Amino acid sequence: MAEDRSPEPDADVCIVGAGPAGAIVAARLAEAGHDVVVLDAGPRFDLSEREEQLDAHLRPGVEGEASGGGGVDGLWGMGGERDAYTSSGSKGYPLNAARVKGIGGSTLHWQGMVMRLHERDFELQSRHGVGADWPIDYADLRPYYAEAERELGVAGAADNPFAPPREEPHPLPAFPPSHSDSIFADACEALELPMHSVPNARNSEPYDDASACVGYGTCKPVCPSGAKYTAERHVARAEAAGARVIDRAPVQRLDHGPDGERIEAAVYATPSGEEHRQEARAVVLACGGVENVRLLLLSASDAHPDGLANSSGAVGRYFMDHCFAGVGGRIDRPTRQNHVGFNTSECHALYDGEDPLPGVKLEFLNYAGPSPVIEALHADDWGDSLLDTLRESYGTHLAVGALVEQFPRAENRITLDRSTTDDHGNPVPDVRWSVGPETRQAIERVNEVQRAIFEELDADIDWVVGPDGTGPAFHHMGTTRMGTDPAESVVAPDCRAHDCDNLWIAGSSVFPTGGAMNPTLTIAALSCRIAERLDSWLG
């Protein structure tokens, strides 16, 4: 029997996207008694198939319903005409390498690190004369950060001397430092780089009806145990409270009323080729920093000739990501990281300096070297010879990484490429991305620190990722920025569009700056705040 994908009558809210932003807003509004509909472009993924997906990832070439052809894209069904894009910037941007369309969004395969932005991130222009200021400050978001940590089930500790002030402990105790963290500890102490724990959205003990982490070590791209948070948890809560979640329902455009000031419906397609209009009193866009923009631009009309909510011309501009910098190599002792699939220690000592350089977060990577499974599959030898090769190449590796901030630049942007279309005939997103001189300078500086750590350890350096080799962390930020001036921003401080009375935008696309902290906790905090304000608006 075909699944019913017809519109929901009398909906209070239509939410586009079932990742963490949309799922949290949906759960909170449904639990408050509102009639909620969620539309997502991708499918539901069966929780019972996670181990099969893991098997497919670890053993490329294994056939099976959950394998999807192997690799991260295959595991979550990304690629092909549905997910086509172009990249016309000075630096190519591999958009499909980390995004997921489907119930749960990118939390299905994220690494799960969640930390608060620092106070300087909200006041970058005021403090340093670069970037932009947020129209809210850390104090405004502080209580919502606490709510977000409870919603995600964050394991953490109050051991970071550089962290912003907090009001209560994390919901769960922090994960202990890994064996390789202990190797780094003496070197970092000598270099005055205090190490501290990493807040993680994974269970260090049972929480929210999910087990504690059991150490698969494969958090990215798949957690078979369910200990790592995915937005599926909030989708389940939303549905339990009466929300309706429709998968494989890509929204084609948003239709507004005669005056252009209110959204009347989200027009979506179904796998059978039908097109429906989901009407609602309010609409929440929560489909990421690229697809939020694409949908607004696809919704251009006589009232909004440059795209919906784009009277400022800022829709799609100021696209930011975090750049990676790293150093890796080997040391003459076992490093034992194979059972840890996430970071357990980091350092924020380079983050809040007095100079106007981008923020930098040092990460001590639990990296054991190339996977022995992959190495064995591609080896030319076998037996004892292969075993000796694997022993030599695995388990003695170390790596230090860093996330480096990008300042918002208007030329970094998302637009439509009208020469290329998706499976519904719509123009695909084009990503124009480049790395500015200030970010290059910050990467060079952190590379020097990373080399110093290896020198202090008397470890051999095998590779360096510096300014010329940097790539994105796939944190899409800034493309529908928040602000008080409708001529310079897309949404107001409450994340409601300046140009449309009943349109809210959730997620990291509203960030005026990106800092160097993984964005999901801030996404969750803003989503809690949006739900609170939208609940009041709906009455």
Image: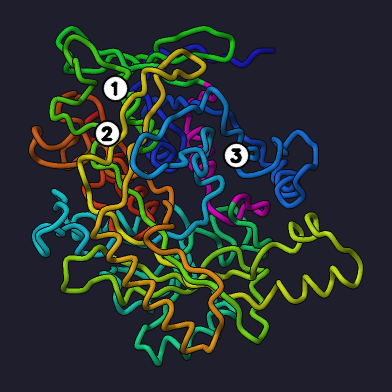
State the scheme by which the image is colored.
Answer: rainbow
Quadrant of the rendered structure where residue 1 is? top right
| Residue shown at 47% from the left, 91% from the top | 186
Q: Nearer the viewer, residue 538 or 45?
A: 45
How far is the residue under mark 3 from the one under mark 1?
Answer: 26 Å
Tag 2–tag 3 contact (CB < 8 Å): no
Q: Closer to the N terminus: mark 3 or mark 1?
A: 3
Q: Residues within 10 Å of mark 1 (few under 14, many from 20)?
A: many
Q: Decide if residue 284 is in sight here.
A: no
How far is the residue under mark 2 from the one under mark 3?
Answer: 25 Å
Identify the element where label 1 is drawn: helix
Residue receiving disc 1: 297
Region rendered in magenta: 221-248
Tag 3–tag 1 contact (CB < 8 Å): no
Residue extending furthest toward the right = 383
- Where residue 61 sits: x, y (%)? 78, 42
Tell me the amino acid under the disc marked 1: Leu
Q: Closer to the N terminus: mark 2 or mark 3?
A: 3
Q: Decide if residue 319 is in sight here.
A: yes
Q: Nearer the viewer, residue 175 or 252?
A: 252
- Where residue 506 sits: x, y (%)? 32, 38
- Where residue 177 sits: x, y (%)? 54, 78
Quadrant of the rendered structure where residue 385 is? bottom right
Q: Residues within 10 Å of mark 3 (few under 14, many from 20)?
A: some
Q: Taking 247 as reference, is 253 above or below it?
A: above
Tag 2–tag 1 contact (CB < 8 Å): yes
Tell me the amino acid under the disc marked 2: Gly
Q: Nearer the viewer, residue 5 or 207?
A: 5
Tell me the amino acid under the disc marked 3: Asp
Residue receiving disc 3: 73
- Where residue 526 sits: x, y (%)? 29, 47
Residue receiving disc 2: 316
